[in-house]
Amino acid sequence: MEIITTPKAWGNSLGIIISREKARAENIDENTQVIVKLKKLNPVSDVFGMLKKELRGFDTQKFKDELRREEKETYKRKFGLN
C-alpha cells in the first residue's frame, strides 16, 4: 500500500502519520515494524499520477491551480517577497 503524508516536527525529529483506516487495512498497530520508502513528491506531477483513480469526477484543474497558488505563496513567504 502506498500513502501520501506530510512529516511533522516531533522533538528534534520528524514523524509521519498513518491513518487508522490505512493501518487497519494493512493490519498495522503500534508494535508492528514497517518499512517506509521515502520519496519527495513533485506536488503537481507525482500526486496526480498516484491519485488518478481517487480523483475521478473531481475538478482536477481547480485542484492543480490551488496547488500552484499555494506553492507560489510558500515561495513568497520563504524569500520575503510580496
Image (cartoon, helix red, strand yellow):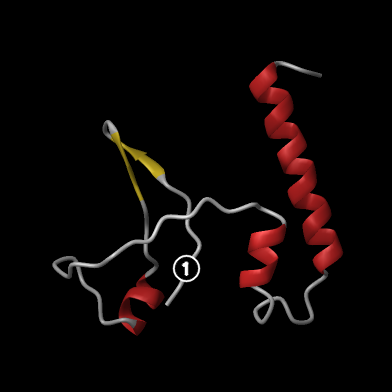
Q: Residue at x 78, y 46 (%)?
A: 68
Instruction: Depth check: give the residue in front, 49 or 24.
Output: 49
Question: 24 left or right of 77?
Answer: left
Quadrant in the picture for residue 17: bottom left
Quadrant in the picture for residue 28: bottom left
Question: 66 left or right of 12?
Answer: right
**Where does residue 65 sit, x and y in percent of width and height?**
83, 52
Q: Residue at label 1? A: 3
**Where does residue 44 sit, x and y in percent of width and height?**
72, 56
Q: Residue at x 67, y 70 (%)?
A: 49
Residue that lies at the very extreme toward the left in this rendered image: 31
Vertically, is 38 above or below 9? below
Q: For label 1, count other residues whose C-alpha is less than 10 Å away and answer few (under 14), some (14-19) or many (20+).
A: few
**Where does residue 69 sit, x and y in percent of width and height?**
79, 42
Q: Residue at x 78, y 60 (%)?
A: 63
Judging from the image, what secondary structure is the residue with disc 1 in?
A: loop
